[in-house]
Structures are given as structure tokens and as C-alpha cells.
Image (cartoon, helix red, strand yellow):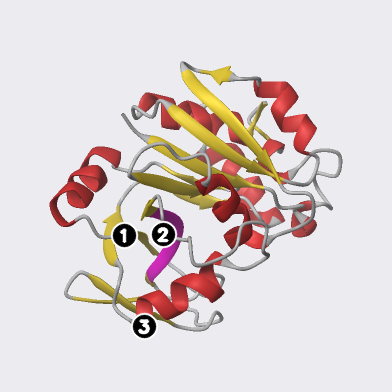
Amino acid sequence: MMEAIVLAGGSGTRLRQVVADVPKPMAPIAGRPFLEILLNSLAHKGFHRVILSLGFMAEKISSHFGPNFAGMELVYVVEDQPMGTGGGARLAMEQVTLDHVFVFNGDTFLDLEVDLLEQQWSINLRPLIVGREVPDTARYGRLLVSEGMATGFTEKGVVEPGLINAGCYVLRRDQLDNFPVEEAFSIETDYLVPAVTAKKFDVFVSRGQFIDIGVPEDYLKAQVLLENYT
């Protein structure tokens, strides 16, 4: 039994020039909405329940998928005003039923080795950041690791290969309880940076296919890279 949160509330400002009439997670990839590809992948990996944290054009997502998709129960939480990745995750945490949950970005595809990650969680019962080696870290910044533990992040703009935060986490159900529900905050800046500085996160390095469709050039790349996942 596994649950996931998908953060799909962003307006997709940078992608608006190529996809103007739908929320970013619904941008068409090889003829299908990106979020459909992501949810199919989660279903194939054994997830039984997904909580979708929505905002911009929420009804276009909820009306497309309904209460069930690919054998999974879908639960929707909708923010009344933009609350950032942290606020969206915190709101979704209220619907989690298990002791831990996988968190995914709704504009990022990662062919995650879920069984290995679940195994690592079961051994240590510590929150995890998923890292991914990429040929150019400039857009993302680097994830710093020592002895399997996250120790920090570097600024964006460094053009070189390295390990990045892939935007996927495994968190305890109460992990964000120090933040009030419906408060806007960034899960990366306001939560992860201090938590990682305090050495509270383990790292799992994925080798699965990875692409973030949030900018036009990578959105176009995804049309080819994700064609076999549709």
C-alpha cells in the first residue's frame, strides 16, 4: 500500500508561450496530458492512492480524471489562493492515511525505482530526497551529499554535470505539521534548506528517466523522451 502527493497547482508562467489554455500538468505530451503519463507511471509502480494538490485551472484536472484513474483512488485538494509548493504539500498532507507519503512535482517525470526507495525508507524510517545525476546542473543547482545524507544545496547557474534535487521526496505524514494549514511557503526554501542543514534527510539517487517540462525547450524534448511512456 503506497500513497503519493502530486503538486499540480502551479500556473506554468514560463510554459504559457507554448501551452496557454491548460494548467501546466495538463500540457500535451505525444498526444496525451503530461499528468496522465505521470499517473499511469505511478499506477504501474504500485501506488493505490494519489492526492492531487491543485490551484490554477483545478477543474480542468479534476474533471478530466474524476475520482479514480488506472486503478488508483484520486483525492483532490484545491488551494483558494497560491500557496507555493510547501503550502500545497501541507494541505495535501491532511488527506494522507499512511505513516509516510511520496511527494512528486506535477511538472516533472521521474521513472523512479519505487521498490528500492520504499525499502530504504523501511530500513531507516528517515525522510528522503531523491537525487538525479544530470549533465548540466545550471537550471537546478546542486544537491550536496555526504555519506548518504543531504548536507546542502548550491545556487543555480553552475554549468557542469552533477547531482540535483529531482523534486521527489518521501516524508512522514506529520513532516510539515510545524507549518499552519493554508499558509504559503516553499517546500524547497522554507523547509528543505533548514532541514538539510540540520542533516535530517537521507538521499536516494535515481537512475530513471528524468525530465522537467517547466520550460519550453525541455517541454519540446519531452515530446520525444516520453513518447514510449504514453
Point 54% across, 79% down: residue:
156
Element on which disc 3 rests = helix
Q: Counting residues from the N terminus, which is met first, the one under dot 2 or under dot 1?
A: 1
Q: Camera-side residue: 60 or 199?
A: 199
CA gap, disc 2 and disc 3 = 16 Å
| Residue hosting label 2 | 175
Q: What numbered label is drawn on residue 47?
A: none
Q: Residue at x 54, y 36 (%)?
A: 51
**Label pair 2/3, CB-CB below 8 angstroms:** no
In the image shown, does 127 or 35 lie closer to the viewer?
Answer: 127
Disc 3: CA contacts within 10 A as few (<14), some (14-19) or many (>=20): few
Q: Which residues are magenta?
A: 163-169
Q: Answer whether labels 2 and 1 touch (C-beta < 8 Å).
A: yes
- Mark 1, residue position: 127
With 157 as the anchor, is 197 left or right in this view? left
Residue 197: numbered disc: 3
At a point 31% along the width and 60% down the height, the residue shown is 127
Is 213 placed above or below 148 here? above
Q: From this viewpoint, is residue 146 visible?
A: yes
Q: Amino acid at mark 1?
A: Pro
Where does the image place residue 95, in percent across and percent down from the top left?
52, 39
Task: Identify the secondary structure beneath mark 1.
Answer: loop
Amino acid type shown at disc 3: Thr
Mark 2 to mark 1 CA distance (whole Å): 8 Å
Q: Quadrant of residue 222?
A: top right
Residue 29 x/y as whole percent = 64, 34
Label 2 environment density (alpha carbons within 10 Å; few <14, some 14–19, many ≥20): some
